[in-house]
Image: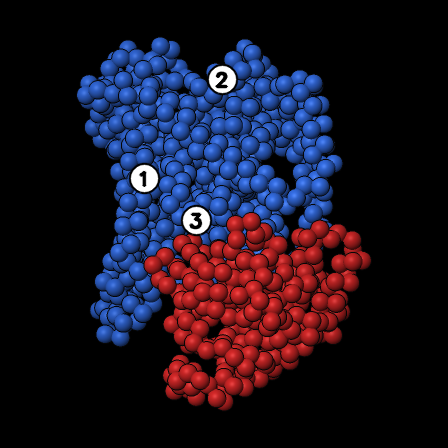
Amino acid sequence: MTGLWEILIRGLWFCTAIVAVVAVFFILFFLVRDAGPIFSAVGLETFLGGAVWNPTGSPPAYGTFPLIAGTLLVTLGAMLFATPLGIGSALYLSELASGRVKAVVKPAIELLAGIPSVVFGFFGLVVLTNWIRVGFDVPSGESWLAGSILLGVMALPTIISVSEDAISAVPREFKEGSLAVGATHWQTIRGVIVPSALSGITAALILGMGRAIGETMAVMMVTGNAAIIPDPVFDVLSPVRTLTGTLGIEMGEVAVGSAHYHALFGVAMVLLVITLIVNVCAMLITERLREKTTASAAARHRILSAETAERLLRSSGLLVIALLAGVLWVVAGPCTTLIALAALAAVYGIRERISQRHVQHVAFGFIFISILIVLLILGIILYDIISHGLPALSWEFLTQPPRNLGREGGIFPAIIGTLYLVGGAILVALPIGVGAAIYLTEYTREGPVTKIIRSGVDLLNGTPSIVFGLFGFAFLVLFLGFGVSLLAGLITLGLMVLPTIIRTTEEALRSVPDALREGSFALGATKWQTIQRAVLPPALPGILTGTILSIGRAAGETAPILFTAVVFSRRLLPGSLSDPVMALPYHLFILSTNVPGAEQNQYGTALVLLLLVIGVYLVAIVIRSHYRKTVTW
Amino acid sequence: MVNRMQENGAILSTRDLNLYYGEKHALIDVSIDIRPNTVTALIGPSGCGKSTLLRCFNRMNDLVGGVRTNGECLFKGKNIYAKEVDVVGLRKKIGMVFQKPNPFPKSIYENIAYGPRIHGIKNKKALDEIVEKSLKSAALWDEVSDRLHEPAMGLSGGQQQRLCIARTLSVEPEIILMDEPCSALDPIATSKIEDLMIELKENYTVIVVTHNMQQAARVSDETGFMYLGKLVEFGDTVQIFERPREELTNNYVTGRFG
């Protein structure tokens, strides 16, 4: 009897574990199914290489080249902006910051990660593009530059935290060995610490890039969305349009089944392929990193010789300088550019005569500046939204439905809608995610099956949120006939947060020592009894943290619910799962892009959304630090 | 005091050196004189402060937060804890070999060339010479000369440790500090390192911290016994092991505690 029960339980957890894999296949299937007709109609070559995207013109043109170029350019700019800041900040946190400073700065960076993308977009739209417009004296600040800065900022937390982990993982012995031959701290960082952490830092950059490529809302709100290739190509003030932006803008207005509809799924395919390449690269690199910790594997890998590394560094440095010079030429004129280049050459000329101590001062100066810039950005965003948003907050604002297209009245239905969506998404994702994690850690050994499941989870995790939105629309709204509804939205959101829950739960389960399991088995407990009574209770705080992080993520996401669940104006609360709902992120998006004269309520909505998400994250941080203090194995 | 130093010709001395890790008083009034071109062993039970003392000599303790020192530590008559001292330059002159072999994740060649490069040597030929000379001095050249560009992590533990010694030698220090250099090695590798220590004292001054009393007796000219942060007794190795003046030292070297 117990035997059968155990088998049933095992089967149940196996089913939850393969949900992620099945979801990936479904997403692929529906994308391919709905994108297929456009490829056969216009041909792959025209679709990818065509220079004009004008699906509503006559004749319509479906060339995605400008969109691909837009995505790549915005991402490139974001990386140029975020790489030095991110690595500098990571070095600051891991090498220079004292424990007390770190205890403040690290949560601040995590806070930056918690800001919803639509809030970033809103800030970009009302503040950043305005600065660019005034600063460069151009008619509109909605540009490649704005998109790159904003995406760079959004990629920063990923880059900083992953590279900091990599740098902190460099054994202390390496550092001591270098200092013991009389290297300065900076020479040690440059010569030993950064090279040892290089694969981790690279993975961090690629993950950050993945985040930037897949981002929809923020980029769509600030890039101007003209489907053109900038001319000249490094004109950062030109508007651009990304793949994600195209989906966000056009998907809502397209006739289902038209060539345009299929073309948009084609765009999503292109987007998915690009993010897939990026994520696979990151996976391969982290895999290598994991292998490298064992000495024998390290011996198998050929190591970059110092000369090759130096050459690589030098050529990529030159490339970056050339790019920056091009940008400077456009925005500040040839004169400034030449002066900057001359100064650079002068410093390079006398570099032999600068003492190592001065080199260290300069290097640490740059590191310090980079962390200051990151904190400053966070400060500006928070200050702007809080200072403008507070006056809008009132009891009426929180408890009344909107009036006059949201210019007046409150956001009550949007708050409730968001709570419904998030609560539902967690109800969907939590049992599946925890089950999958239990299966992966407790029931199997590492093998082909776990590898497939884990890859599925990784792929799902790397899928851009707008692609989830498209899938939800094609599969849930249309194919299953749910219509634009709460149900379709919460399932889509649930799928999106599933990887986070699986991963954090897995981590929590793994941190439970085997001795506890063995102790329970030794008393004659079955597998499930052991998991239930000996493994899950101590893992609970970890699972809780993961769940809360998912709540924060789901609450701030816009793209997945854009076409599946939300409407802008609805006085009544949803009566059933098949009703559409209002949601805070979408409300903010529409208020700031489509409703002129709603400044105060925009800021109010942004603030409420920000407080909601940050509050949720704070709870997670508190739980984590509380249990880290009380529970030690 | 200076006179005494000149009389006994010490290269490195401490005078009433005290060190605190936060509240913990880890070194208490340590005064010691290290003569040049000798091997000095520091012995004592775990936690007695012998590694801490060793790490004072090249100010490696600076890396640990919350460390305070007072008293003097004189290298060639100059206090290395004085404000104007260049710690980086000091570490070039006083090298260190660690308990666990810690080669960098680079090739054998790059491990040795790292130090000279740091100090401004760029010429390929000069670097080649330094690498060869250092590896020969560390008795490793014959084993690795045909695979200089392979990863250092692929060497055995004993070879890695000799590589680390070669790395230390590459910047031509005057003193080599060794912090239990054989504790992670097997007996054969250990005996190679011990032979090396005796060879090295011809050109360098070696200070070695060890748990292994036979090792101290085999390699050192002078031995210091430490207990609970104090230098209990310091003197000629033969005397320390055969006719210790202190009861504590006697108990330790005869294995009655430790």
Q: Is residue A298 left or right of residue B112?
A: left
x then y, percent, for residue A3: 26, 69
Give the colour of chain A.
blue
x then y, percent, for residue A162: 48, 46
Kind of residue sitting beneath label 1 = Tyr
Label 2: element kind: helix
**Vertically, is A297 above or below A626?**
below
Residue annotated with mark 3: A457
Report the residue at 66% width, 30% height from top. A323
Kind of residue sitting beneath label 3 = Val
x then y, percent, for residue A438: 33, 57
Q: Nearer the viewer, mark 3 or mark 2?
A: 2
Q: Are the two marked residues, 1 and 3, in contact with CB atoms closer than 8 angstroms?
A: no
Q: Callout 2: few (<14), some (14-19), or many (20+) C-alpha neighbours within 10 Å?
A: some
Earlier sequence position, callout 1 versus callout 2: 2
Earlier sequence position, callout 3 versus callout 2: 2
Residue annotated with mark 1: A617
x then y, percent, for residue A74: 56, 29
Label 1: element kind: helix
Q: Callout 1: few (<14), some (14-19), or many (20+) C-alpha neighbours within 10 Å?
A: many
Q: Callout 3: few (<14), some (14-19), or many (20+) C-alpha neighbours within 10 Å?
A: many
Residue annotated with mark 2: A131
